[in-house]
Image (cartoon, rainbow, N blue to C red):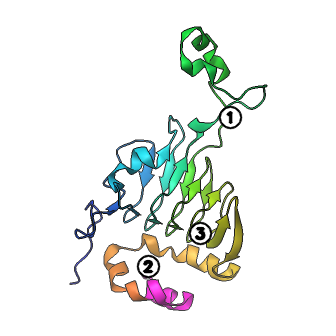
Amino acid sequence: MPLLPDPTVLHPMPEQPRVVLLKPLITSPLIEVGEFSYYDDPDDPTAFQTRNVLYHYGPDRLVIGKFCALATGVRFIMNGANHRMDGPSTFPFPIMGGSWSEHFDLIAGLPARGDTVVGHDVWLGYGVTVMPGVRIGHGAIVASGSVVVDDVPDYGIVGGNPARLIRRRYDEDDIARLLELAWWDWPLPHITEHVRTIMSGSVDDLAAVAPRTP
């Protein structure tokens, strides 16, 4: 019986404290992370919730799928960062207190883009910034230093500021097959048995080892 990795361990690589699994780390009810998604930071990866998820005053949620790789400096800007832009000034006067606070209605209920969602098996490169309400598809790759302002398609590769689609990793038919196979939902023992195929096989290879339903 192969030894299965433990998705509840904070540091999956004890000799590398810079790497943390996010699911056992997160405490906010507004953040959801799937198993084995990790963050790598040589400074303090355990501060991810406060240092990398910014302006999260609610009620929007951050949802990150399973098996995602987040490099150092990945940051999510949440809807709480919004300012009014329909008047002469964008300055949020009411939060400074005093009699200015009487005008809090001017900044309450600002338009929001909704939840920020990262699919399964997504790789976010060094220093990526994800703006509010963005949806990043399954299997996507975001190049280092990119600022993601729009949705990213499944298995898309994007880069730049603002991030633009460079290419898709597979053609439409193979993407549809990959989404149907959804290897990230396979039982952990089955994933463990077929790691080599998941990492380096073709779509046909992956389909050949997919669990069979009774």
Q: Looking at this rendering, what residue extends furthest in the top direction?
A: 99
Tell me: 46 left or right of 151: left
Quadrant housing residue 13: bottom left
Q: Is residue 83 visible?
A: yes
Magenta stretch contains residue 100: no
Magenta stretch in the rendered image: 197-214
Per the image, the residue denoted by label 3 is 143
Q: What x and y, as percent, mark residue 109? A: 63, 27
- Which residue is nearer to you in this view: 103 or 137? 103
Quadrant housing residue 106: top right
The local secondary structure at tag 3 comes to loop
Magenta stretch contains residue 200: yes
How many residues crowd mark 3 within 10 Å: few (<14), some (14–19), many (20+)? many
The local secondary structure at tag 2 comes to loop
Per the image, the residue denoted by label 2 is 213
Closer to us: mark 3 or mark 1?
3
